[in-house]
Image: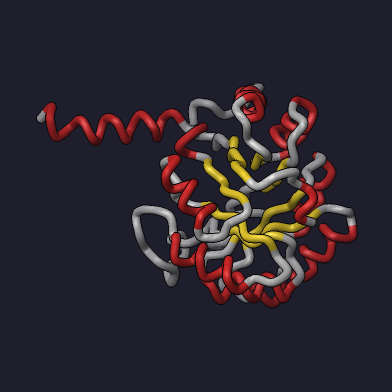
Amino acid sequence: MNRIFKNRGLIVSCQALENEPLHGGDTMIKMAQAAQQSGAIGIRANGVLDIWGIKQAVELPVIGIIKRVMTGSDIFITPTLTEVNQIIEAGADIVALDVTDRENRLETVKKLIDAAHAAGAAVMADVSTFEEGMAAEKLGVDYVGTTLSGYTSYSTQIAGPDIRLMSQLAKSLTKAVLIAEGKISTPADAALALAVGAEYVVVGSAITRPQLITEHYVQAMSAVLG
């Protein structure tokens, strides 16, 4: 499934949640077009409308997710078969889903992986630990992403990207391909992720979420402003 992407490189995550200023309309489509124009080799998108619109607008592979909050559950990245089917129908090349060791997910997620494969889509596992990454490979995913490191209570809690996890998985995965994702906020972070063995690097907030980018500047300047 590595052939989905022509080369190693940058995947830009073009997402805006409902409570964010850039949500809706064709904003994420334009973000994806800008990413393609600047050399990105893929796009990660959230929601049926954005996935479909981006697939029509760019000539890049799209990783699709659907974030759905379910009462009583911490799993919200493509949680059920319903979302898997919607992502595939929208035209995504790769379905990304939570493959963490929460709520018996590792025991139930196989049917979602198999369904995506049966429909001709590749699968990316969003994991938070080394053990989850290796378990995901055994479940048959095509890509393992470090997306959720720091976002589960038991994973490494650091401010920046989990380079150690990326390095460990790069050395240990034999079939699945490593995608570095999560808290990658500078070009140096992205280059380091490639250097330790990731095939692809996903960057989202640092490129496509201006409210967070602005916040970082404001916080850095606040000490001087008083």
Which residue of the protein is positioned furthest toward the front in this rendering?
A: 195
- The quadrant of the rendering that contains the N terminus is bottom right
Relative horizontal placement of residue 157, taking residue 98 as reference (left or right): left
Q: Quadrant of residue 77?
A: bottom right
For the point 69% across and 57% down, the residue is 124
Q: Relative to residue 48, is residue 132 depicted above or below?
A: below
Q: Position of residue 10 (x, y in %)?
A: 59, 42
For the point 77% across and 31% down, the residue is 59
Q: Position of residue 67 (x, y in %)?
A: 62, 48
Residue 72 makes an appearance in the image: no
Number of numbered discs overlaid on the protein picture: 0
Residue 10 makes an appearance in the image: yes
Task: Give the camera-side residue of 81 and 8.
Answer: 8
Q: Position of residue 137 (x, y in %)?
A: 69, 71
Task: Give the camera-side residue of 49 and 32.
Answer: 32
- The quadrant of the rendering that contains the C terminus is top left
For the point 49% across and 52% down, the residue is 182
Q: Relative to residue 197, is residue 131 depicted above or below?
A: below
Task: Give the camera-side residue of 183 and 77.
Answer: 183
Relative horizontal placement of residue 161, taking residue 65 as reference (left or right): left
Q: Quadrant of residue 51?
A: top right
Task: Give the camera-side residue of 65 and 75.
Answer: 65
Q: Relative to residue 168, is residue 222 depicted above or below?
A: above
Relative horizontal placement of residue 134, taking residue 181 as reference (left or right): right
Which residue of the protein is positioned furthest toward the left in this rendering?
A: 226
Q: Quadrant of residue 116?
A: bottom right
Q: Is the image coloured rainbow, by chain, by secondary structure, or in one colour?
A: secondary structure
For the point 43% across and 48% down, the residue is 189
Q: Position of residue 211 (x, y in %)?
A: 41, 30
